Each structure stands twice: as structure tokens, then as C-alpha cells.
Image (cartoon, helix red, strand yellow):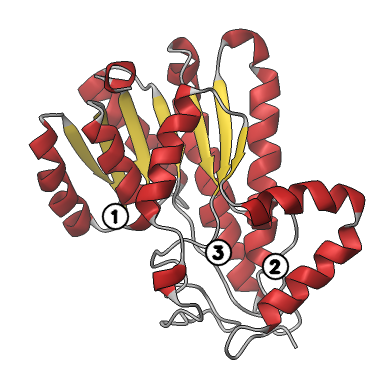
Amino acid sequence: MKVRFKDKVVIVTGASSGIGEATAREFAKNGSKVVLAARSVEKLLKIANEIKIFNTDVLVVKTDVSCEEDCRNLINKTIEKFNTIDVLVNNAGISMRASFIDVDLMVLHRLMDVNFWGTVYCTKYALPYLIERKGSLIGVSSVAGFHGLPGRTGYSASKFAMHGFLETVRIENLKKGLHVMIIAPGFTSTEIRKHALLANGEEQAESPRDEHKLMAPEYVAKWVIKGIRKKKRNKLLTWEGRLTALFQRIVPSFVDWVYYYEMSREPESPVK
């Protein structure tokens, strides 16, 4: 596998923590040249210094994916240094936790800006290079992009939008050798829940779940690598996710009730 990814140029957004950081490290272990993108330069530089033990080139680019010009700059800086792009991992994302009837609409705008438009902007400017290399375009999503998740209207909407966008890009480039994969982890132990937006737009600060029982970011990162190697189309990493994708076509109302029950059990759940 190391030979497969050696010297490949890989961009990872949201690389300052969680799945993004773990994915960047995994590519570096496999000999790839890694571009780290996120808003926190300090965190990225720390990770970059640690990644260099794998004797690979690393580029740090401060990027707010909700800003089109930042995404354009990310791609331009990558091309200036490495001349090409083999893999783009659209991982940057934020979540929310509020009932739609209570939520300020600015929260939904923020989630769409980061989760959906961030993917669109980065893909737009990277696509010519990915097509040239017959590379891989990755969207890190969620089961919430396959079935609505109560208390996460903006999150589900942004992931559904991401899916529609990436699937269409895949179809438009069927004859060009572009690989497009949507990967959907289960609940993963990252900081996303701590930074999830509440109804008024403030971060909730504390996770409502036992983070020690959740999926490890490193596990997700290994599946990103495997999915690219095997040219996977969609990869749901949990049986719950796979069953959701299956049962929503057969007994969608049952899935509704399962999700309602599951989300209502969270401490101080917005789902009543």
C-alpha cells in the first residue's frame, strides 16, 4: 500500500484535529506529500513537524473552507509547491444540536457554508488537476447524509447536499477516470460535538456522548486509504449506517422512529 501512495500529493481539509489530522498522518505514513488545511496555523504547524518523521514533504495552508478565496489559495499554493494534486479529502465540517423550530437560521447558513460550500469551493479549483491525474475526490460525510437526523437539521441538509454534489461530479466525469468516494463514519471521537452549534449559534462546549465509546479517528483514516485503493463509491463504516441505507428503502418510517428514539436519549436532547 505504501508503494501505491508514495509521492502522491494529498490535500486534507480540517486537518488540525480529529479525522482530518488522523487522515493526514496516515497518508504521510504511506509516503504521500501532504497538504494540511485548517484555520488554526499553530495546530497545523505542530502536526506538520510531527509528520516530518516519515520523511515526507508537508505544506501548511491556513484555510477557512467557507471562504472561496481561501479555497482557491489552498489549491494555488499546492500547485506552486507540488505541481499537481492526486487526492482531495474534503473533511472540514461542523455540526449542530437544536430543534429546527428553535434554531436561528444563521446556524443552518453556517453549516451549509462549511460542510457544503467548503466542499464545492475546494473541489472546483482542484478538479482539473484531479482529472489530469485520474485522482480521487473524497467527501467525509455521515449517516446523516443518508437519512435525516433529528436535532441536526442543518447538518443533515449539508451532508445530503454534499452527496448530491459529489455524485453528480462523479457522473459528469465517468469517462475521465476520476474516482469519487463518499465515506460515512459512525459517531467518531473528535472535537466536532464540543464545537457543535446550539440554537442561538453558540458552541455547546461539552459532548452529550461518551467519547471513549466512539469510533477512533485513526480507524476512519485507515478506511479512507483503503477506500481509495479499492476505488470505493460509498463506504459506510458501521452496521447501523449500512442497515439505515437498506431499511430506508424498505421501511423508512421504522428508521424514523429508531433515529427519534436514539437522539431523544441524549442528555438535554432537543428532541422531545
* Amino acid type indicated by mark 2: Thr
Against 251, residue 228 (above or below) is above
At mark 2, the secondary structure is: helix
Q: How far apart are marks 3 and 1 (CA)?
A: 19 Å
Decide: marks 3, 2 in contact (CB < 8 A)? no
Mark 3 or mark 1: which comes first in sequence? 1
Q: Which mark is residue 110?
A: 3
At mark 3, the secondary structure is: helix
Q: Name the residue under label 1.
A: 16
Compare residues 14 and 5 and report the one nearer the observer. 5
Mark 2 or mark 1: which comes first in sequence? 1
Compare residues 154 and 146 and report the one nearer the observer. 146
Residue 74, percent from left and from top: 33, 37
User: How many residues crowd mark 2 within 10 Å: few (<14), some (14–19), many (20+)?
Assistant: many
* Amino acid type indicated by mark 3: Arg
Corner quadrant of residue 88: top left
The answer to whether residue 14 is visible is: no
Q: Residue 153 carries which label?
A: 2
Compare residues 235 and 55 and report the one nearer the observer. 235
Residue drawn at x 52%, y 31% as measured from the top left: 124
Residue 161, percent from left and from top: 68, 47
The quadrant of the rendering that contains the N terminus is top left
Decide: marks 2, 1 in contact (CB < 8 A)? no
Residue drawn at x 42%, y 72% as measured from the top left: 211
* Amino acid type indicated by mark 1: Ser
The answer to whether residue 224 is visible is: yes
User: How many residues crowd mark 3 within 10 Å: few (<14), some (14–19), many (20+)?
Assistant: many
Q: Distance between the residues labelled 3 and 2?
A: 12 Å
Q: How far apart are marks 2 and 1 (CA)?
A: 26 Å
Judged left or right of residue 89, residue 171 is: right
Residue 180, percent from left and from top: 57, 28
Mark 3 or mark 2: which comes first in sequence? 3
